[in-house]
Amino acid sequence: MNYVIPAYRIFPLGDTALVIDYGNLVDEAVNKEVMSRFAQLKNANLPGVIEVVPAYSSLAVYYHPPEVWKKRTRAMTVYEWMKDEVGQLLAQPVANDQSTERLLTIPVCYEDEFAPDIRALSATKNISVEEIIQLHTATTYRVYMLGFLPGFSYMGEVDERISIARKPQPVNVTAGSVGIAGRQTGIYPLASPGGWQIIGRTPLKLFDVKKEEPALFKAGDKVQFISISKNEFANY
């Protein structure tokens, strides 16, 4: 079966980066392509590249213009040269390698004191709290990207029956809080203002600067939530 390279476009992001954009969408197949290209670009050793950052359906490639200027071999601007080099890599087929995907089981307490918005969600969607918990724990979620806070995980997609809009104004959110915004779910690794609807909390520490890899999650991970009691939370 021939490999079909998904459609994309490349455009500048300021003077020191470019974006590879596969469209504004949440799609697991596209995100797998993004992660495969992320690995390819990280290992390509392109001159001047500082960092490659994956998102839902795009990648940002950050580079150091003076270094690229010295290395370029054709009479082009730094951006044009980098775009051409990246384009040549993207023309090569890559495998969607799933061997590095991890399945992480995350305990969550959905009781009221940890879930300030779960009863409002229940009333809005006309389903019981027990149904919300069942629906939220029934799905294995993909971590599409990290952002907003160090280690904040954007996962998808929740069942439409518990999909709900963000709050109109941010409120203070406790570290470990599990929230829903639209069809996304995620966990706040740190205390922060936030607008997601909070339906539970995990006792796990999701970001620890003392660790070699501070963030628990990586883009491409799979996550399964399990429900725990208040007593289990306190003794976890």
Image (cartoon, rainbow, N blue to C red):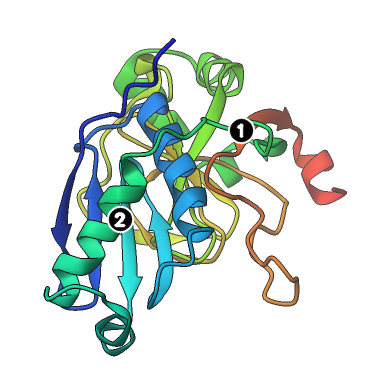
Quadrant placement of the N terminus: top left
Q: Tell me if 202 is positioned left or right of 48 in this view.
A: right
Whether tag 1 and tag 2 are in contact, CB under 8 A, the answer is no
Residue 86: mark in rendering: 2
The part of the image, by quadrant, that contains residue 3 is: top left
Which amino acid type corresponds to the residue marked 1 in the rendered image? Lys
Q: Of callouts 1 and 2, which one flags the residue occurring earlier in the amino acid sequence? A: 2
Q: Tell me if 218 is positioned left or right of 145 in this view.
A: right
Residue 233 placement (x, y as % from top left): 77, 45
Please name the residue shown 25% across and 66% down the image.
Answer: 82
Residue 84 placement (x, y as % from top left): 22, 58
Q: Nearer the viewer, mark 1 or mark 2?
A: 2
- The foreground one among 215 and 5 is 5
Please name the residue shown 35% across and 30% down the image.
Answer: 30
Whether residue 182 is visible, yes or no, is yes
- The foreground one among 11 and 129 is 11
Please name the residue shown 30% across and 49% down the image.
Answer: 88
Could you give the CA–CA distance between mark 1 and mark 2, rounded to whole angstroms? 29 Å
- The foreground one among 108 and 101 is 101
Report the residue that reaches farthest toward the right. 235
Residue 114's place in the image compared with 46, above or below, is above
Dot 1: few (<14), some (14–19), or many (≥20) neighbours within 10 Å?
some
- The foreground one among 8 and 56 is 8
The part of the image, by quadrant, that contains residue 138 is: top right
Whether residue 110 is visible, yes or no, is no
Where is mark 1, residue-wise? 222
Q: Tell me if 125 is positioned left or right of 236 in this view.
A: left
Query: Under tag 2, what secondary structure?
Result: helix
Which amino acid type corresponds to the residue marked 2 in the rendered image? Val
